Amino acid sequence: MATKRESILLITILFSLIGFGVIGLQILPHIPILFGIALLLLFGLFKRIPWSVMDTGIRNGITPGIPSIFIFLLVGVLIAIWIACGTIPTMMVYGFSIVSKQFFLATVFVVCAIVGTSIGSAFTTAATVGIAFMGMGHALGYDTAITAGAIISGAFFGDKMSPLSDTTNLAPAVSGVDMFDHIRNMLWTTIPAFIISVILFAIVGQGHAATVDFHTFQATLQKHSTISWITLLPVVLLLILAMKKVPAIPTLFVGTLSGIIILFLFHPHTSISNLISIMQDGYKSQTGMKEIDQLLTRGGMQSMLPSVSLIFLSLGMGGLLQEMGIIAQVMDSLSHFVRTSGRLIFSTALTAIGVNFLLGEQYLSIILPGRAYSESFDRIGLKRRNLSRVLEDAGTVVNPLVPWGVSGVFLSGVLNVPTFSYVPYTFFCLLCPVITIIVGFTGIGLSWVNGNSPIGKSVRTKTEA
């Protein structure tokens, strides 16, 4: 297996390789990650690591992502059907009469936060109300990257705070704390991030002029799409099932099926072959208005295949890094830095962020640091709910910022905006890890086993213990 020096060198080379490809050459991450996998395999051969071990690593890395991949494909179909049956166009038309044009971005952030908290899924929030907001933002003259940043920020507020969210249940479970105690403790970092984000979106949202005539835009939508409150029933069904904790896959099937029923209700002459074409290749908008056709020509199972291939590659690389012991060596190196409460929280946050970038998997960014640092929190006398909060602040909300991460790939594909384009505007996601680190060094909001403790109290590393 890899030594500590070899692990750090390999991680540096991998980051440089992927960074050069994505940032320097401005290409998709697929090929750089493929070269990264090749590099790891060559290193494995050099170290005489059996192929069976490396093969197991790739398989184990991909396996946790299979449910997400299936969800990706279902979401592609759902989007196409919801456009065809009128659900998304109706959300856009109704939204124009409800949403404040002056404070559009702030409104988008708050609404997505409410929806995300209600259903506990950032993916579903972005793929439903998010797409409608993208269309509205374009008509209002907002850069798609800015609108996407507001949508993602709100969606991941919900993913972080909702008791229905997987991550909100996983972080306290890994840390060994009560979920509602965990949610209450997250308010120390979440409320400041939320307030600052609302202010920033309100400021950024000023001075934008509509790029198209509203009346023409709405009239074209009403002429070429089914605009009716009935088309919103799939959204209502999806929200109800999500709040009842029905798993994502059956919920998406119900959302798609209800959309198909509405499609045939308003368009009974739709042929089966046309329906299958929409589900497979996506909806093709032909209104004659370029702005609308660009926004509504999307969806379909095929549209998600580039995302699926990237997830396979990134998770496979992550599995190799784990199986070859590279991740464990790097995390062990970080543990020697942990000597005070501030450093402990900083190291935990840094590790969660690093796992997101190295493995591309949101759950592992919570599980691995949670297991690695739990004893350190006990030794210094910090309550475990501090650990679970850091895992959410630097694990859950960072995954959408990674171009090859599961969330980043999904959101980029669904919203049709490159990850690096929307990252500067995901204010909430960027603020959470910064605030949690500040909390660690200042001691504000930290809870101690014995009531209170001086900031900077030393903690022994695993080696010293």
Image (spheres, rainbow, N blue to C red):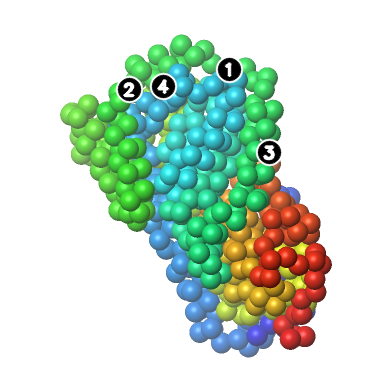
Residue 198: where, in percent of width, then height? Answer: 63, 34
Residue 380: where, in percent of width, then height? Answer: 72, 74
Regarding residue 423, the answer to whether it shows in the image is: no
Left or right of 360 on screen, residue 300:
left
Amino acid at pointer 2? Ile
Left or right of 252 on screen, residue 214:
right
Q: Which residue corresponds to the image point at 49% horizontal and 79% vertical from the top-left?
A: 56
Name the one closer to the observer, 257 or 373: 373
Name the one closer to the observer, 317 or 130: 130
> Which residue is under mark 3?
196
Q: Which residue corresponds to the image point at 52% horizontal and 12% vertical from the top-left?
A: 213
Name the one closer to the observer, 268 or 309: 268
Name the one closer to the observer, 95 or 375: 375
In the image, farthest residue toward the left: 268
Give the number of the mark in front: 3 or 4.
3
- Mark 4 vs mark 2, CA separation in Å: 8 Å
The reply to whether dot 4 and dot 2 touch (C-beta < 8 Å) is yes
Amino acid at pointer 3? Ile
> Which residue is under mark 2?
227
Give the number of the mark in front: 1 or 3.
3
Tell me the number on the disc at residue 210: 1
Whether residue 177 is situated above or below residue 437 in the rendered picture: below
